[in-house]
């Protein structure tokens, strides 16, 4: 049971709350003490995307007293396939503002503290220290390692969820009682092994399942019921519809949690390429070469729908799957080997993989250029 | 025959098979057999002879670091799970 509730200083419930939470209160394992513990508790939800959408709504609906939201992004149409806290009416609105409105509609008594910023090494300690439990609903490795390291330093439980394609993962990393994220995965994968949802896709309901489970774990931690997923990870395979629990090892030499909390130093996690192949070209340099009508072909390896939604003027569409199929079947493509090829995707990752495939098929690495950070960093003209 | 449970991120190497059976004695042999036809898959799992630091392997649901690591013995009907870190959210 939550410490506040057990000593009788958790807040009392109003008549409206007693009605609203009736189905919690009738469960003897939870009861009025569990509900009061939730009201006294606080959660910091980092990321209001696919995982944060269901988590935010369930935390508010369940009666967590104070919820912090960390996100600086605005709602985009491509989010709506999975980020169900938002909708068409709030396109262009901050995700925090969108989620806040939905949460208050479910529970007008919840205190919502919006932090409309990205989590950084400069603000992580200040933000995370204010809350009892952290939910990691982020979408990238550097922020996940920052969340983990800060939680280990501050002694906070970190309810981890991750999704990709048809896979989901859930755990509670609490360095005081079990392994942390770095015990399990000491380093992030190189970028070519680490696609994000925009690159590799995700079935929209996957973060729905995992985000709801993250809310469950946070509620359990605050109210003190059940067994949290400390030292275990749930692996959800959406294609097989299987849930598997694996038992994790605490690493005695963990670069984070083997240290005393005060000795844990927060650092930027830099994503690196395992073995860069070919050359890299910046957006500025490509603009110069386009303006000079240099002899080259800009090849966009994204999917046709991405290409149609906005591409570098004059670029040729040749999706990564089509290109790899051509290489698999014929060992070659119709792309010339005696001209410079500028490979483009959304972030620079798929194009990097394509360059490796082309080099393996006999293309000269010196003729192959990867557009650095892809369309995400492209400042030149776009046609759609 | 032990069974390797393949995460979806690696199924492009297994014709989308979710489970692959291998007749071997240790985790190391199982992963070697599993990746023998694909240098890319081998490269995804190993850096030299060591497991990569973003891959966790479990035997019957237990991290092999709690057992004997790559030398962990496996028997008929054992399941070997490969867990690749995913960051999407």
Image (cartoon, coloured by chain):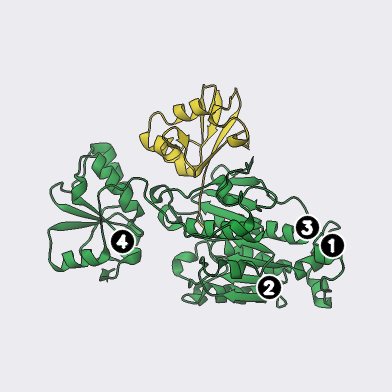
- Residue A160 falls left or right of residue A28: left
User: Where does label 2 land, which residue?
Assistant: A106
- Could you tell me which chain the residue with mark 2 belongs to? A
Q: Is residue A251 above or below residue B67?
A: below
Q: What is the distance, in whole Å, between disc 2 and disc 3 at their CAs?
A: 23 Å
Closer to the camera: disc 4 or disc 1? Answer: 1
* Whether label 4 touches label 2, CB < 8 Å: no
Is residue A208 visible from the viewing direction of this image? Answer: no
* Whether label 3 touches label 1, CB < 8 Å: no
Q: In this view, does B29 lie above or below A18?
A: above
Q: What is the distance, in whole Å, between disc 2 and disc 1 at their CAs?
A: 20 Å
- The x, y position of residue A60, in whole percent, is 68, 69
Comparing A123 with A196, the one in front is A123
- Residue A361 falls left or right of residue A107: left
In the image, are marks 2 and 1 on the same chain?
Answer: yes
- Could you tell me which chain the residue with mark 3 belongs to? A
Q: How crowded is mark 3: few (under 14 residues within 10 Å), some or many (20 or more)?
A: some
């Amino acid at each position: 049971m939550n410490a506040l509730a057990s000593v009788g200083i958790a807040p009392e419930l109003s008549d409206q709350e007693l009605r609203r939470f009736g189905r919690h209160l009738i469960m003897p394992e939870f009861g009025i003490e569990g509900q009061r513990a939730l009201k006294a508790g606080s959660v910091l939800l980092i990321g209001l995307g696919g995982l944060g959408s269901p988590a935010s709504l369930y935390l508010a609906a369940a009666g967590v007293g104070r919820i912090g939201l960390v996100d600086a992004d605005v709602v985009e149409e491509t989010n709506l396939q999975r980020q169900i806290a938002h909708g068409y009416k709030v396109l262009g609105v901050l995700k925090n503002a969108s989620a806040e409105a939905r949460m208050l509609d479910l529970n007008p008594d919840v205190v919502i503290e919006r932090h409309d910023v990205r989590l950084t090494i400069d603000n992580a300690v200040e933000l995370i220290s204010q809350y009892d439990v952290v939910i990691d609903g982020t979408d990238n490795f550097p922020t996940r390692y920052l969340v983990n390291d800060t939680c280990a330093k501050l002694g906070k439980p970190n309810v981890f969820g991750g999704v990709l394609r048809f896979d989901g993962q859930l755990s509670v990393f609490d360095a005081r009682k079990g392994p942390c994220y770095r015990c399990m995965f000491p380093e992030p994968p190189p970028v070519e092994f680490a696609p994000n949802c925009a690159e590799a896709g995700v079935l929209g309901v996957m973060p729905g399942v995992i985000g709801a489970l993250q809310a469950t774990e946070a509620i359990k931690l605050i109210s003190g019921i059940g067994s949290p997923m400390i030292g275990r990870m749930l692996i959800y395979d959406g294609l097989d519809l299987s849930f598997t629990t694996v038992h994790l090892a605490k690493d005695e030499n963990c670069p984070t949690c083997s240290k005393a909390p005060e000795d844990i130093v927060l650092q930027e996690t830099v994503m690196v390429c395992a073995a860069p192949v070919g050359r890299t070209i910046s957006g500025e340099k490509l603009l110069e070469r386009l303006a000079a009508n240099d002899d080259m072909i800009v090849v966009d390896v994204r999917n046709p729908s991405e290409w149609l939604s906005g591409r570098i003027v004059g670029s040729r569409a040749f999706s990564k799957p089509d290109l790899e199929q051509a290489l698999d079947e014929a060992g070659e493509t119709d792309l010339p080997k005696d001209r410079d090829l500028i490979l483009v995707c959304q972030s620079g990752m798929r194009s990097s993989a394509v360059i490796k495939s082309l080099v393996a098929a006999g293309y000269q690495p010196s003729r192959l250029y990867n557009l650095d950070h892809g369309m995400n960093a492209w400042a030149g003209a776009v046609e759609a | 025959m032990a069974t390797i449970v393949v995460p979806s991120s690696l199924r492009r190497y297994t014709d989308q098979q979710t489970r692959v059976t291998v007749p071997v004695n240790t985790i190391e042999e199982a992963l070697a057999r599993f990746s023998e036809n694909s240098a890319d898959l081998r490269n995804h799992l190993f850096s030299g002879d060591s497991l990569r630091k973003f891959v966790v392997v479990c035997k019957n649901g237990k991290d092999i670091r709690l057992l004997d690591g790559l030398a962990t013995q496996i028997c008929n009907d054992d399941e070997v799970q490969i867990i690749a870190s995913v960051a999407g959210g």
